[in-house]
Image: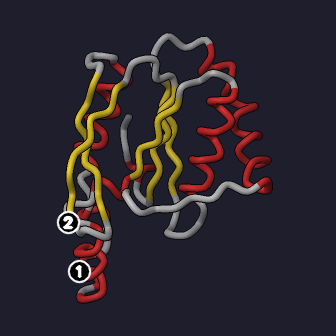
Amino acid sequence: MIGDKITLLKENLPPAQEIVDLIYNVIKFKNSPYVISIAGESGCGKSTLSAALQFLFEQKSITTLVFHMDDYFLLPARSNHLAREKDINHVGVHEVNLDLLDQQLLEIKEQKKLIISKPLSDYTKNEITTEEINLTNIRLVIVEGTYTSLLNN
């Protein structure tokens, strides 16, 4: 999401390094992109862990792409936040287009496209646009968000 600022600190790297140590050899020898999900509640460090993983994997020449579930909300970010404040029943998996995210992850894994068009949320402008993502040489996709553990791909 446009506007998110992630600052990596030295102390963010050791937990990410443990994950890198566990899966690096699997990714290194895999012929298609590898996808991992980082799920958890708001504010628990999903985005920071994703950034740390991307940093460490790219140091090992594993080209990495991070997908943020926040880009897949059905409403623009600020509107979604206001809808949550107005009615707690708005909160939940039904506020996110997980089907689209899951489909795009499958397309990446199957390597059927070189470019995909994904949503891109801008909190400040309160709008959802799209961005073109070049998938050439992508070896790892990290998808992070509250509900990403529900994805099939």
The C terminus lies in quadrant: top left
Q: Which disc number belongs to residue 68?
A: none
Q: Residue at x 31, y 70 (%)?
A: 124
Mark 2 nearby-residue class (10 Å; few <14, some 14–19, many ≥20): some
Residue at numbered disc 2: 75
Give the residue type at disc 1: Ala
Separation of disc 2 and disc 1 at Cα?
Answer: 9 Å
Q: Provide residue 111's location: percent of width, then percent of height.
A: 33, 17
**Does 83 sit above or below residue 142?**
below
Q: Amino acid at mark 2?
A: Leu
Q: Are marks 2 and 1 in contact (CB under 8 Å)?
A: yes
Q: Earlier in the sequence, mark 2 or mark 1?
A: 2
Q: Quadrant of the N terminus?
A: bottom left
Q: Which residue is identified by label 1?
A: 83
Give percent across and percent down for residue 89.
26, 80
- Rendered image quadrant of residue 71: bottom left
* Farthest-out residue, bottom: 86
Give x and y (percent) for residue 7.
63, 59
Q: Residue at x 30, y 61 (%)?
A: 122
| Left or right, 30 with reference to 10 | left
Q: Residues within 10 Å of mark 1 (few under 14, many from 20)?
A: some
Is residue 119 found left or right of 40 in the rendered image?
A: left
Q: Residue at x 37, y 24 (%)?
A: 135
The colour scheme of the drawn protein is secondary structure
Q: Secondary structure at mark 2?
A: loop
